Image: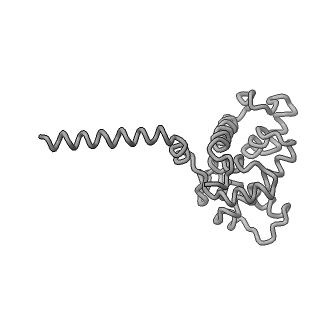
Amino acid sequence: MKKRRLRKRVFLILILALLALLFIRSEWMSRWLYPVHFREEIAASAEVYELDAHLVAAIIRVETNYKPEAVSKKGAIGIMQLMPDTANWIIQKGGFKDMTTEKVSAEPEAGIEIGSWYLNELNAQFKGNMVKVIAAYNAGPGTVNRWLSDGTWDGRAETVDEVPYGETRHYIQRVIYYYNKYKTLYPDIRAE
């Protein structure tokens, strides 16, 4: 009987110690819940294409949760989930000589580079408005331009509930959520 009580006490002490550690090291717990993989690749592509690395990481998190082999129901490929036609357009327009859709699909570094190039293109098109860029990454720039020109949506985060596509509305909210989490947890995305 005494052994049983002793075991219960030791178990209780271990549980309390673990809980205390989690509260004391909540940053550690947060980083465990919100990891960023491929940090070097994200940071390098973000630097080359003049992007916020946290945005690239947030889009990857929402698109594939860092699973490079993911293929969507609609056929999007790679870690940043580009449609094959879009990936081919990027490869051609961006002058990526040794790039193929197979490479984008199979190699995280290639997917991150191509996706970052596309984000840069959208960033230029939407004059740095991150919310419009996120919307265009999901729904397409033509669709977002139509919403803006016909007054359906004004392109602000505060009015995201006016985005007519539920998928895009939810996508914007999720990307912004992860973007803010990553900015807090990883001020320098390269650092451990």
Q: Residue at x 85, y 61 (%)?
A: 93
Query: Residue 141: which quarter of the image?
Result: top right
Is residue 114 depicted above or below 56 in this figure? below
Q: Residue at x 67, y 36 (%)?
A: 173
Of residues 26 and 63, the one drawn nearer to the viewer in this rendering: 26
Q: As drawn, is 124 to the left or to the right of 53? A: right
Query: How many tags in the picture?
Result: 0
Name the image quarter holding the N terminus.
Answer: top left
Of residues 1 and 151, the one drawn nearer to the viewer in this rendering: 1
The colour scheme applied to this rendered structure is one colour
Q: As drawn, is 19 to the left or to the right of 93? A: left
Name the image quarter holding the C terminus.
Answer: bottom right
Q: As drawn, is 58 to the left or to the right of 149? A: left
Task: Give how far across and how far down residue 151 sits, in percent.
Answer: 84, 28
Of residues 183 and 91, the one drawn nearer to the viewer in this rendering: 183
> Extreme bottom residue here?
98
Task: Give how far across and how far down residue 54 sits, in percent.
Answer: 70, 47
> Extreme left residue here?
1
Query: Residue 183: which quarter of the image?
Result: top right
Is residue 72 depicted above or below 185 in this figure? below
Q: Residue at x 78, y 50 (%)?
A: 51
Query: Residue 111: which quarter of the image?
Result: bottom right
Task: Give how far across and how far down residue 31 sits, in percent.
Answer: 55, 47
